[in-house]
Image (tube, helix red, strand yellow):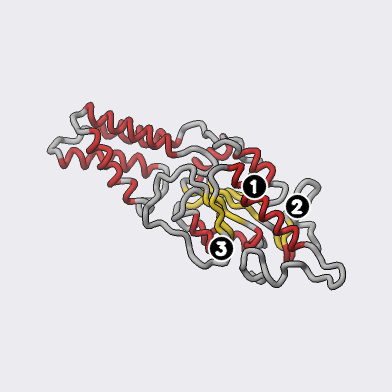
Amino acid sequence: MNNSHCRTASRNMCAPQNKIAALFVDIDGTVMECQKYFDRAEREFSKLMSLVGFDPAQARETLHQVYYQSMPHRGFERQRFAEAIAEAYGKLCKSNGQRKDHVVSNICERIGTAPFFNQPELFPDVLPVLTRARHNFLIVAVTVGSRDPQKYKIRQGGLSSVFDDIIITLQENKAQLVDEFMKDVGVHPCYSLFVGNSIRSDGATLAKTNFAYLPLETSLASPTDAFPKDTGFELFQVSDWPEFEERAINRLIRRRRRALQYDSGSGIQIGAADSPCGCSESS
């Protein structure tokens, strides 16, 4: 097998069938903290609403109805949260018979913009785990949001040199984009995986490759969210990055090495007929 495309002096990403192994990584809520900035904006909004005469609990409930309960239909552009806070203020004014103040509306929009301009904070152990994973996987960031802010966060978080590629989308279509990437680049789905914190958005990729559920933040979760069933790929459920490395990354590396071994007598690859993750080797 010609493996010059998957092996360098410091990296071995080779998988069966002359393909490569990839690790797809969600960013917000998986690699770096995200929800606490939105929680802070929510507190500031409810405080502002109390200062202009509204009940802070009603203000929070209105914001939840306007923004959180309308996702993902509202969209994931950077300005959407600011628009939602200003819209929530407008709804409070209407329901309470109060005239809307344009100065207050502008303050609402500034509050809603603030979460996107914070120094990124990585979850513990993210950087060392991803740095080690680079020796055995092509590393691809997959993130929802506006392109410039997402690339900015990755760069400011010190992760630019970790990722080989970045997939950025404004829709909840990660499974489709990951599938297209794997076909374009020659990624073997049985020896690759996606790690993310959302069952709905990230977990949909379980239909295309293995998935590790790492729920460090679950802000937009719904009781009706569910993983795809009977996909032939494996679901790993882990609680932190060290556990993800040991119970997902390292297991896939061991399986891949075993599949790449040749029987000295027949020259047939072990595992060629029956992939460890249950999917067909012709995938």
10 Å crowding of disc 2: few (<14), some (14-19), many (20+): some
Image quadrant occupied by the C terminus: bottom right
Q: Which mark is residue 208?
A: 3
- Vertical placement of 24 versus 149: above or below? below
The residue pinned by badge 2 equals 12
Mark 2 or mark 1, which is nearer to you? 1
Compare marks 2 and 1 and give the one earlier in the sequence: 2
- Vertical placement of 281 versus 79: above or below? below
Compare marks 1 and 3 and give the one earlier in the sequence: 3
Q: Amino acid at mark 3?
A: Lys
Q: Amino acid at mark 2?
A: Asn
Looking at the picture, how far across and down is residue 77, in whole percent? 42, 46
Along the line of sight, which residue is nearer the eye, 200 or 84? 200
10 Å crowding of disc 1: few (<14), some (14-19), many (20+): few
Q: Amino acid at mark 1?
A: Glu
Element class at badge 2: loop
- CA gap, disc 2 to disc 1? 18 Å
Element class at badge 3: loop
10 Å crowding of disc 3: few (<14), some (14-19), many (20+): many
Along the line of sight, which residue is nearer the eye, 238 or 165? 238
Determine the residue positioned at 62% across, 67% down: 278
- Vertical placement of 230 versus 100: above or below? below
Element class at badge 1: helix
Compare marks 3 and 2 and give the one earlier in the sequence: 2
* Residue projecting furthest to the right: 265
